Amino acid sequence: MVPFVLSELPSGVSQAEAIEKAKAGKGMEARAGSDGALVFDLALVEPVARAFTETREKADQASRPALAFDEALFGGKLLTLPHGEVTLKSVEMNVRVALLYVLHWLYGHGTVVVNGCVEDSATAEISRAQLWQWVYHRVPLAGTSQQVDARDVAKSATRRKHNTTSSASLPRGCTTPRFLDDNNALSPSVHHDVPTRTRVAHEDSSVFLDDREVRATTKTRKLRHAIKSVAGLVLTT
């Protein structure tokens, strides 16, 4: 799916650039044999559709050896582990995506826009899983002598509190989870500054929910998993 939200692109990225990037990516998929694509922003329907139309005008898609294209491009890579570096920026980006998605989910929203791209439960889970893997395997941080550490991830999440709570995209009355308690120890607790709230305790975690959320028992069960997924990164390491 093309995740761009043209009205919320970060500064320095123009709508024209985002549209051209979307067209280029989907044009490659069209040449590989794809018949269509998903977009989040309705304003991208026409330019993405045009990318497929232009491809069809150049060649008959039905006669294109799409499978051979895929084999030539990816066949040799299936058993080769990718190489890359983990940077502090990538750690902070994953923390931001996971936190913002959980916060918006608690307030009944299934998506959140981060840096001009829509994020949903799938990308939030990818962000959480990557953080867990980096912590568990002590992955080195590029350009430093350090490794990805659970406490540093928690501190990064806590530092995001000031930026997140002042963001216009954050639901009113919602604050980020508190990852470190007053003694600088990891804490799985989450607090919501809402007028009416109820404490819900689950073994090793406590959360505060407004009355609307308490009534949704299935959401409460999902909440426990969501909080442990983000705030409890080190509980399973």
Image (cartoon, rainbow, N blue to C red):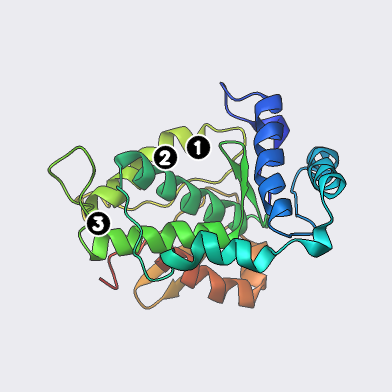
Q: Is residue 201 visible?
A: yes
User: How far from the left and from the top, in percent, is residue 88?
Assistant: 30, 41
**Depth check, front residue: 215 or 169:** 169
For this view, does 71 lie left or right of residue 186?
right
The residue lying at 50 percent from left, 37 percent from top is 165
The residue lying at 47 percent from left, 72 percent from top is 225
User: How far from the left and from the top, in percent, is residue 25?
Assistant: 65, 45
In contact (CB < 8 Å): disc 1 and disc 2: yes
At numbered mark 1, what does the secondary structure look like: helix, strand or loop?
A: helix
**Depth check, front residue: 218 or 77:** 77
Which numbered disc flags the more N-terminal residue, 3 or 2? 3
User: How far from the left and from the top, in percent, is residue 91?
Assistant: 35, 47
Q: Can residue 171 be seen in this view?
A: no
At numbered mark 2, what does the secondary structure look like: helix, strand or loop?
A: helix
User: How far from the left and from the top, in percent, is residue 127?
Assistant: 45, 56
Q: Kindly identify which residue carries mark 1.
A: 165
